[in-house]
Image (cartoon, rainbow, N blue to C red):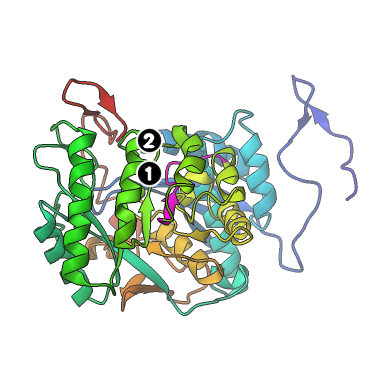
Amino acid sequence: MSETAAQTLNDDGLPEPAVAPAWEPTGGLPALRITNVKAIPTAPDNIRLVVVKVETSEPGLYGLGCATFTQRPLAVVTAIEEYLKPFLIGRDPNDIEDIWQSAYVSSYWRSGPVLNNALSGVDMALWDIKGKRAGMPVYQLLGGKCRRAADVYVHAGGRDPQEVEENARRFLEQGYRFIRCQVAVPGYSTYGSQIRPKAAAPTFAQPLGLSQEPWEPTPYCRLVPKLFEHIRTALGDEVELLHDIHERIPPIAAIGLAKELEQYRLFFLEDPFAPEDNGYFPILRQQTAIPIAMGELYVNQAEYVPLIRDRLIDFIRVHLSDIGGLSPARKLAAFCEFFGVRTAWHGPGDVSPVGHAANLHLDLACYNFGIQEWTTFSERAREVFPGTPEARAGAIWSNDRPGLGVDIDEGLAAKYPFPAHPLNGAWPPVRRRDGTVVRP
Ligand code: MG
């Protein structure tokens, strides 16, 4: 690389402009520049989504990425519009790695969900652009398919074990074979168990902790083994069962629950501990062989690298946009492969269809794919996001269009602004009976 010619220095004595590298890695393709970066907030399913659109100097060529941090979306929009946009205009969108690394350190203090989501929006959009330019789906750029489609799991909740069973049976009839089961604890605010019908396709999504009922760990720990005894007896051995503790109980209670649940042969038990309690994993591992999935709350490699290196978890559950997008996720997946850890990327309704497509491209290209969490989008959301992945026979399939394969109808997206909310989408506190706030 040749040094740049004489540089102008700014008031701080730093070279200006300082953002573009001194090479032109066009790879034989015509020069291309980023001309605009914008955040698109939309909520077609009443869930606050943020998508980033990166426009280029080639007419009609743009990319989309998911930057959805549904509890703090306005902070992400500011990070994109006020910081990443001026940083990126004029850059060559081919330089995905250099853009990611330079934008990552441009705040000096880095990582965290707001900045990672903003970066993810740009990062995924750049992969989308590269795929469109190459005329290939992104999974081809990642090494090509190593499976036809990605098996998914869906959420069956209910007010009691019978209702969970009924809802699970409905999914089994639709061809799903991996079911996450969550049951309401009567009188308590329980994660993931309330029924929230959607307009077009009824699903059983999490209530996002909006209930004002209290939460107590002991009744939950008593009830969950009864749920799985009921479900395993009723549905037999074929179905794969999953459960999410959602970091809600004391670590030693989670270890006890994991041991009790081992006999029901779960596909995985998720988030037994909060990220703050990572130190409990070595203790859990010596007590039970129940498969452990962990990590939707992780934002920093310092949190997950030791768990993988020490073979303390079985499935990595990070939310792609919360760790910074497709670029860090593909490295993480490769790292996991060397330690026998499988992927199970976070995929609830607060991942946009663009983010779900990014999950899918990794699912198809990574040998160590484990399972994909799936949510059913309404027809309305599918109209806003043409090309949204579809589920058939219990799996999601690529539409094989170049790039990520999902577009956005911006006019339609604008018709679904964020719903009014006293906290702008933030989760209200869940409290114990005595008023002590608990983890959500
Ligand atoms: Mg979870």
Q: Secondary structure at mark 2?
A: helix
At a point 45% along the width and 37% down the height, the residue shown is 275
Q: Amino acid at mark 1?
A: Pro
Residue 337 included in the magenta stretch of the image = no
Q: Earlier in the sequence, mark 1 or mark 2?
A: 2
Circle 1: is it few (<14), some (14-19), or many (20+) Cα within 10 Å?
many
At a point 9% along the width and 60% down the height, the residue shown is 162
Q: Position of residue 245 (x, y in %)?
A: 31, 45
- Alpha carbons under labels 1 and 2: distance apart: 7 Å
Q: Closest to the observer: 431 or 220? A: 220
Give the residue pinned by disc 2: 251
The reply to whether residue 18 is in sight is yes
Circle 2: is it few (<14), some (14-19), or many (20+) Cα within 10 Å?
some
The reply to whether residue 203 is in sight is no
Residues in magenta, as a range: 290-300
- Magenta segment's dominant SS is loop
Q: Position of residue 183 (x, y in %)?
A: 17, 51
Q: Closest to the observer: 142 or 53? A: 142
Work out whether 213 lies above or below 392: above
Q: Secondary structure at mark 1?
A: loop
Task: Evaluate if marks 1 and 2 touch, with contact meaning CB atoms under 8 Å apart.
Answer: yes
Q: Position of residue 306 (x, y in %)?
A: 59, 43
**Residue 61: quarter of image:** bottom right
Kindly identify which numbered label has been placed on residue 272. 1
Q: Closest to the observer: 181 or 32? A: 181
Q: Give left or right: position of 408 versus 308.
A: left
At a point 49% along the width and 51% down the height, the residue shown is 313
**Residue 217: quarter of image:** top left
